[in-house]
Amino acid sequence: MKKILCVLLFPFIAFAQKQATDIIVYNAIVYTVDNQFVTTEAFAIKGGKFLATGSSKNILAKYNAKQKIDAKGKSIFPGLYDPHSHFMGLGQMLSQCDLVDTKSYEEIVERLKKFDAEHKGEQWIIGRGWDQNDWDIKVFPTKDLLDKAFPTKPVVLTRIDGHAIIANSKALEFAKISPTSKVNGGLVEVVDGQLTGILVDNAMGLVKRVIPQATENDKRKMLLAAQKECLKLGLTTVSDAGLNQDDIELIDKMNKEGSLKIRNYVMVSLGIRNLDYYIKKGVYKTDRLNVRSFKLYADGALGSRGACLLKPYSDEPSKTGFLLLSAAELERSLTQIYSSGFQANTHCIGDSANRLILDIYGKLLKTKNDRRWRIEHAQVVDNKDVAKFGKYSIIPSIQATHATSDMYWADERLGDVRVKTAYAFQDLLKQNGVIANGSDFPVEFVNPLYGFHSAVARQDAKNFPEGGFQMENALTREQAIRAMTIWSAYANFEEKERGSIEAGKMADFVILEEDLMKIPKEKLRNVKVLNTFVGGEKVF
């Protein structure tokens, strides 16, 4: 009788000895992305954090949970990071007329007419996403077609890179822009004494300031729409590259209400009010929001010829681009940021802008350090300047999809020799052994796997060009996944809490339909996200 009782009690004793957890995920290929790039099969989660990793057998034997997820052999990665994006901007774009992939100016007008018919209550027509480099006639448009289609309603259309707009006459009238209007760090384009409607970089502010501002309720809808788009694509942390105080506080409010679950590393937009407020306030951090950096702009974009180059553009020898702030203003702001302890993240596209900012950083940082100051984009870097990233511990925050979007015309802008100094990801990685890879969405598509594919294959969605674009600077698959997980976390001062699947870190992870580390390159862009988890909560 005693033997029978012992046998009956044994399963219950064994069950009681198991440690209670919230979730167990097993039967998976788990890429931990830890220091050794260990792969395993299972993990346990408790209180929103990873408790342990190991084989399915060991995890199931040691832990018990009400929720057990059989991954059915699918691959799991840490939650994906976008270290340079425009999260609020994505929400805004989703509420505007989508002009991405338009093949002509005429197609833009047709899209605008349809949008206007569906949004009859709107006083302005706002759109984004055009790129003249995708058209047969690869020159900036003029306002003529917009004036003909919309003679009484203001129209403002932002170029895909966010560094130029085309506005119709009604919008220019509202903004009181004339052929004599001038702006430092920007261009009001005038041909034969007449406005063309093109405004580049700082000149865009002339018309943006008269566009009706979104209400808080509008912004809430935008942020939720952006979150939905990001979570379904496996992003658990985004980095909003330039926000003002009001928008930052709204994000914080929505985090605390529980409606906004995605994590956000916010870069504060440079400005006197923002500088004074946040330097006095200091770093602000919750488990969903991290505010500890400032975003600066040194120059514009290559596609709109606003990137500041050391030598003239090869396809327009009268232009070298321009700085958006003077060298003195940039140094003054960076000196203030350095004294505060905040991180500085500066937009630099052209080789002249990169040299200037690297030298100002070097003057302040002096030697290797742990300030983790970043160059955003680091797109065209003269060979003489590459070593400065290592000398001053500067992080290159790149966007691999910029390489595969620009490759069709980059050599026209830069010439055959200088283009070799552009999108040099491997050269930049070698300086500090770390590189962060984002998308700059909505400049590029949100999907982070497009960036993974571009970094590894250096090809577009149609696998062009054969053999890849400047493959000497392609990243390996391990480097590419690190660049969008643990290295991005490091660039955000978050590597101790996120970025890899390790005990004690927040349980952010993504389950993919196929294995990024093993499938053919040409399939990478089409991999589907099955589930996204933030802090152990399934959010997609």
Image (spheres, rainbow, N blue to C red):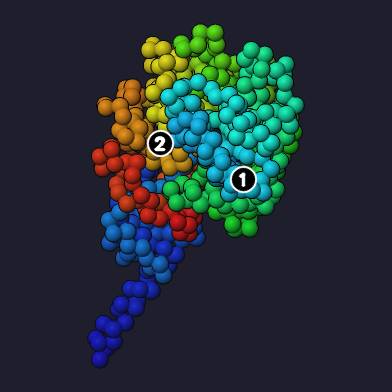
Decide which of 141, 290 is in the foreground and name it: 141
Residue lying at the far front of the rendered structure: 148
Viewer-nearest residue: 28 or 443: 443
Q: On the image, numbered disc 2 is attached to which residue?
A: 451
In space, the residues marked 2 and 1 are separated at their CA atoms by: 28 Å
Residue 44 seen by the camera: yes
Q: Along the line of sight, which residue is nearer the eye, 32 or 223?
A: 223
- Looking at numbered disc 1 in the image, what kind of residue is underneath it? Lys
Q: Secondary structure at mark 1?
A: strand
Q: 10 Å neighbourhood of mark 2: few (<14), some, or many (≥20)?
A: many
Question: Which amino acid type is marked by label 2?
Answer: Gly
Q: Percent from the top left, x then y, of residue 404? A: 39, 29
Indicate left or right for 422 with 345 as reference: left
Choose the circle earlier in sequence order: 2 or 1. 1
Circle 1 packing at 10 Å, graded few (<14), some (14-19), many (20+), is few
State the residue at coordinates (52%, 38%): 110
In this rendering, would 353 be left or right of 194?
left
259 and 48: which is toward the camera: 259
Expressed as whole percent of the image width and height from the top left, the position of residue 277 reads 74, 37
Q: Is residue 243 left or right of residue 316?
A: right
Residue bearing mark 1: 285
Q: Is residue 162 left or right of residue 467?
A: right
Tell me residue 32's x, y (percent): 36, 47
Residue 305 spot, x, y in % from top left: 53, 18
